[in-house]
Amino acid sequence: MAPPKAILFDIGGVCVVSPFQAIMDYENKHKIPKDWINYAISQSAPDGHWQRLERGEIKMDADFFRGFNTDLHNAEIWKKYHSSFRSSKKKLKDLANPTQLGDHVSLKAEVADSTPTDNDRGAQSPPSDNQAAPSAPPKTLKELTKANPTQLGDPVSLKAETAESEPTDNDRGAGLTSRQNQSPFSSSSSPQKKLKDLAKENPSQLGDTVSLKAETASSTPTGNDRGAQSFDPPSQAPSHNSGSSHIPPIPTIDGESLFWQMMKISQEPDPYVYPALQTLSRSHPQFLLGALSNTVVFPPSHPYSLPSPARTALHNLFSVFIASAEVGLRKPHPEIYELAIKRLDKFDREKGESGITAQDIVFLDDIGQNLKAAKDTGMRTIRVQLGKTWRAVKELEGVIGVELMDERTRRSKL
């Protein structure tokens, strides 16, 4: 495939530090349930106060902050967060039980763009030297299951516990093997025991079901981490799905304080994408550079509305700059992408070139919905991950065939 003629950048979370980092920091500091703030903002679309501000429909004033605060304390969205969004994430985490499903980092493989690396796998490294050596080399659960799956219980017992239907023969796969062998955990005179019973009687033989956290984090796994793997009776486990009485009160959030923390952190340039953008602008004029960003308009008296060397320098790197608050559209609305294509095409033709189509553009953004909408127009896309923006630079290098990282960065990251 031919290299793109135009490179289109989002700003927040791509060229500058992501405001999502400020949201994560706020949730951690104030013990707000993970992802609640992002969920509340996204679920208030298309006419929440955040979305209306980014389209330039309302001013950034006291009325906006009151409305934004109301969106962050919406009872119906809070209920939906617990009954669907949060419970679905918990189910995925339960399904990633490393001792039953094998891959300690399978959750990452399902929710991230990249394949887990050896560093990610952590717990699969050999045990430390100070561990007590067993009298005989113990078999791992996977080996025990392979040797005699019937003795350790149903290989797809998780499905039986979490779904309404019984596992089928297709689900069982290799579990339909002979039942003649004996497991080291059973005897000919005792009835066959299930995995849960074995783990309850002697967890040290089967391994800690949440050992991944214990080996890769500084803290000890808590009861919450163990989730459905706890051996407490089901009646003692809290549920967010059985009724509104189990849903805790909506956490108190200072929407105005949160907003300004988000704006402050996004004034800082990204340490990897921004230098790459500078290199493109300085040394590779064959690429047309554009920006497509959901933006806000600050009050005239606010410092962020005044010109600054850093903001001016960033803006000057682009030949085309489309700001949502100025055009009355915001991503992921299809029309704002069509507008970006038209403006890039116009600029290219004014230079005497042949013009730009969607297929000539590669677009970098940090939000999946925005990337999907861009891809629907025909653009190529690159996902910029929070805390891993250097990976996007590396991918962009491959797409355009140009080195963008300096040698120091390349040695530290590749």
Image: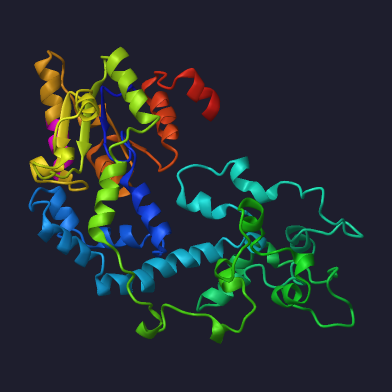
In the image: residue 64, left or right of residue 224:
left
**Residue 339 located within the stretch drawn in magenta:** yes
- On the image, the x and y values in percent for residue 223 come to 59, 71
Of 155 and 88, which appears nearest the observer? 88
Please say which color scheme the image uses.
Answer: rainbow
In the image: residue 79, left or right of residue 214:
left
Q: Quadrant of residue 85?
A: bottom left
In the image: residue 104, left or right of residue 341:
right
Whether 46 is drawn above or below 386: the answer is below
Q: Quadrant of residue 280?
A: top left
Image quadrant where one finds the N terminus: top left
At 78% from the left and 62% from the top, the residue drawn is 144
Question: What's drawn in magenta, residue-wise?
Answer: 335-342
Of 349 and 218, which appears nearest the observer? 218
Residue 229 visible to an observer of this rendering: yes
Of 55 and 25, which appears nearest the observer? 25
Residue 284 visible to an observer of this rendering: no
- On the image, the x and y values in percent for residue 353 come to 15, 15
At 57% from the left and 73% from the top, the residue drawn is 228
- On the image, the x and y values in percent for residue 52 come to 13, 54
Image quadrant where one finds the C terminus: top right
The secondary structure that most of the magenta stretch takes on is helix
At 69% from the left and 75% from the top, the residue drawn is 196
Q: How many marks?
A: 0
**Residue 312 located within the stretch drawn in magenta:** no
- On the image, the x and y values in percent for residue 189 come to 89, 82
